Image (cartoon, rainbow, N blue to C red):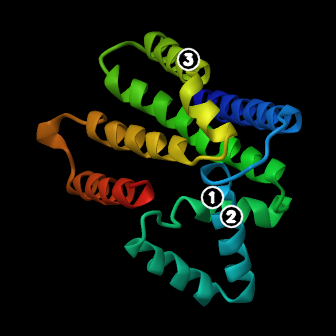
Amino acid sequence: MQAAAWGAGGTAAVVLCLSLAARWYVSTEQTVYWWDYVQWWNFSVTLLNDYRQSPTAAARSVVRSFSRDYTLIPAIPTAAWCGLFGQSRMAFVTGLAAIYGGMLIVSSCLTTLAATQIADRQQRACAAAVAAIIALCWPLPFGVSMRGFVDCGASAIACFILWLFLSAPLSRLPLWRCISIGCLLALLFLFRR
């Protein structure tokens, strides 16, 4: 229980730091947003407006997007975030950092814990901390998120797939995990093609 409390507290602290970093980044940049830099922001706001008009209309928009180059699946969490915190660029990028950055940190730690099952508790905790630090110091996913792209979410889904795969020996992998891995692989394909 104490480890879970530390994990939850650490995750909350990381998400808070990511949110503050995103707010600082957006407030200091002097950019005219165009093309790809504004695309996911527009998708999120459009999906939110569809939802406010009718939840069924929003669901239809998501399903219709499966036949396009970009699906609206990555915009679902950020649309909800924009619904809570506003439709500004600041709110959108803060949501990207908090949601997808937080997911990447958590999934990196879970994957590391699963991969180090043979180690003792202290070594596993140290390995998870190192994974979190590496994920935080890796500039690529967070730089991409600060510019308004959702690719960090795809990395998090890939880490969750690895966690499901590594958390049990292959010979004892339960059927529900195999099905979950298959569903997450399909989601990964739909998330960011």
Give the image location of residue 3, x and y in percent.
59, 27
Q: Residue at 70% across / 30% down in the picture?
A: 14
Q: Mark 1 vs mark 3: which is more N-terminal?
A: 1
Q: Nearer the viewer, residue 56 or 178?
A: 56
- For this view, does 154 lie left or right of residue 34? left
Mark 2 crowdedness (10 Å alpha carbons): few <14, some 14-19, many ≥20: some
Give the image location of residue 144, x and y in percent.
60, 37
- For this view, does 181 lie left or right of residue 38? left
Residue that numbered label 3 is attached to: 129
Residue 56 — which label? none
Q: Secondary structure at mark 1?
A: helix
Residue 193 quadrant: bottom left
In contact (CB < 8 Å): disc 1 and disc 2: yes
Q: Nearer the viewer, mark 2 or mark 3?
A: 2
Residue 39 — which label? 1
Quadrant occupied by the N terminus: top right
Q: 89 above or below 63?
A: above
In contact (CB < 8 Å): disc 2 and disc 3: no
Distance (Cα) linking label 1 and label 3: 34 Å
Residue 42 — which label? 2
Q: 125 above or below 15?
A: above
At label 2, the amino acid type is: Asn
Q: Nearer the viewer, residue 173 or 104?
A: 104
Q: Nearer the viewer, mark 1 or mark 3?
A: 1
Q: Residue at 36% across / 37% down in the picture?
A: 163
At label 1, the amino acid type is: Gln
In contact (CB < 8 Å): disc 1 and disc 3: no
At label 3, the amino acid type is: Ala
Q: Secondary structure at mark 2?
A: helix
Q: Mark 2 vs mark 3: which is more N-terminal?
A: 2
